[in-house]
């Protein structure tokens, strides 16, 4: 009874102190110092908060388990240490049924819990929009990005427009330079991105969106989300894909619908319309250009 009472008086102040500490945390701290949030806590997409919550809550549970485990290890090392004058082996026990049940059941509950929350959130994030407001094809290549903009169907390229990235080029002195391609997204609209590759495996990662997905030859991946905050973001390839992998970067601009439509119209006026999916294949690519020398001069 005394032990229970002591524990209660220890837990109550600890809980109050924890609540006060959390109340003073900034949105960045509450989200585990992850990118994708402004100072007022506004998320970058409709999925960012969910991903952050899964990450932070998992770490909290793991830290609690770790602290308890370390405390028990320290207590056992001190309580059962060899005292002065003791010789031989300590009393040997075959088993302790309550303890064995505890360290079997608790880890099982933790594993099931982690699986359940991860499966729930993944099912939501991986649900693709059947009728998105815009559908964009992102094409990875060594070592740049192509973006093709369509309406609701990525396979319908009749009225599509596109932009082609050129990176990892050498200047007159032989220094490698990059001109980063830019992906435009309309804010607060359903976006579906088709992910494919021209050559090797790449990985499409918009850092502040807290989600990335691989890109393959012969197999298309998809991402669906709603950008919720106007602004500029950084993107990169997250899969080691060759010599200039570190320079395979891109920019993302989340803009209002009017600016998005104006940008697409500027691509159409520049003659960048139609389908680019089959315009260049792996054997024709020079590093970073996506085209042969003769095509690059045109």
Image (tube, rainbow, N blue to C red):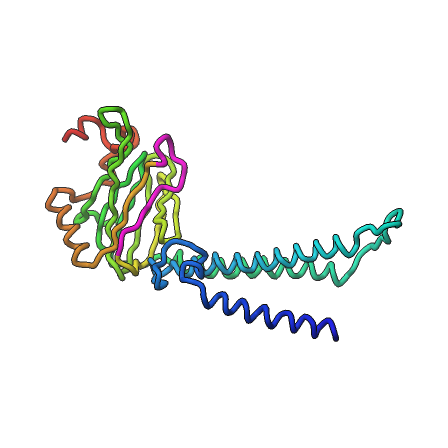
Q: Specify the segment rendered in magenta.
A: 231-246
Work out whether 186 lies above or below 19.
Answer: above
Residue at the location (24% across, 35% down)?
166
* Residue 194 picture location, percent across and down: 31, 48
* Residue 103 picture location, percent across and down: 69, 58
Residue 246 in view: yes
* Residue 78 picture location, percent across and down: 75, 54
Q: Quadrant of residue 139?
A: top left
Residue 123 in view: no
* Residue 233 picture location, percent across and down: 30, 50
Does 175 appear in magenta? no
Residue at the location (33% across, 43% down)?
196
Q: Is residue 120 left or right of residue 130?
A: right
Q: Residue furthest left?
A: 269
Residue at the location (35% across, 45% down)?
204
Residue at the location (18% across, 30% down)?
295
Q: Is residue 3 left or right of residue 139?
A: right
User: Who is closer to the viewer here, 278 or 175?
Assistant: 175
Work out whether 234 lies above or below 64.
Answer: above
Q: Give the position of the N terminus as an image quadrant.
A: bottom right
Q: Residue furthest top?
A: 173
Q: Give the position of the C terminus as an image quadrant.
A: top left
Work out whether 161 lies above or below 166.
Answer: below
Q: Residue furthest front?
A: 84
Does 243 appear in magenta? yes
């Amino acid at each position: 009874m005394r032990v229970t009472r002591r524990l209660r008086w220890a837990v109550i102040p600890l809980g109050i102190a924890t609540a006060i500490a959390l109340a003073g945390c900034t949105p960045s701290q509450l989200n585990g110092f992850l990118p994708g949030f402004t100072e007022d806590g506004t998320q970058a997409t409709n999925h960012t908060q969910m991903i952050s919550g899964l990450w932070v809550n998992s770490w909290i549970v793991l830290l609690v388990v770790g602290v308890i485990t370390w405390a028990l290890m320290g207590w056992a090392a001190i309580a059962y240490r060899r005292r002065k004058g003791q010789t031989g082996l300590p009393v040997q026990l075959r088993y302790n049924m309550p303890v064995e049940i505890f360290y079997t059941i608790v880890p099982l509950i933790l594993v099931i819990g982690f699986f359940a929350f991860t499966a729930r959130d993944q099912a939501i994030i991986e649900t693709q929009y059947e009728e998105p407001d815009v559908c964009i094809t992102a094409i990875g290549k060594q070592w740049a990005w192509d973006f093709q903009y369509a309406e609701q169907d990525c396979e319908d390229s009749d009225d599509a427009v596109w932009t082609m990235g050129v990176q990892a080029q050498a200047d007159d002195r032989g220094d490698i330079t990059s001109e980063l391609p830019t992906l435009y997204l309309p804010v607060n609209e359903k976006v579906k991105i088709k992910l494919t590759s021209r050559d090797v495996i790449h990985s499409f990662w918009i850092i502040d969106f807290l989600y990335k997905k691989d890109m393959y030859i012969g197999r298309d991946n998809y991402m669906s989300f709603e950008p919720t905050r106007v602004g500029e973001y950084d993107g990169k390839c997250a899969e080691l894909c060759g010599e200039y992998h570190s320079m395979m970067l891109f920019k993302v601009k989340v803009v209002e619908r009017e600016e998005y439509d104006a940008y697409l119209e500027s691509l159409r006026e520049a003659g960048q319309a139609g389908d680019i999916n089959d315009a260049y294949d792996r054997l024709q690519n020079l590093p970073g250009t996506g085209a042969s020398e003769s095509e690059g001069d045109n």
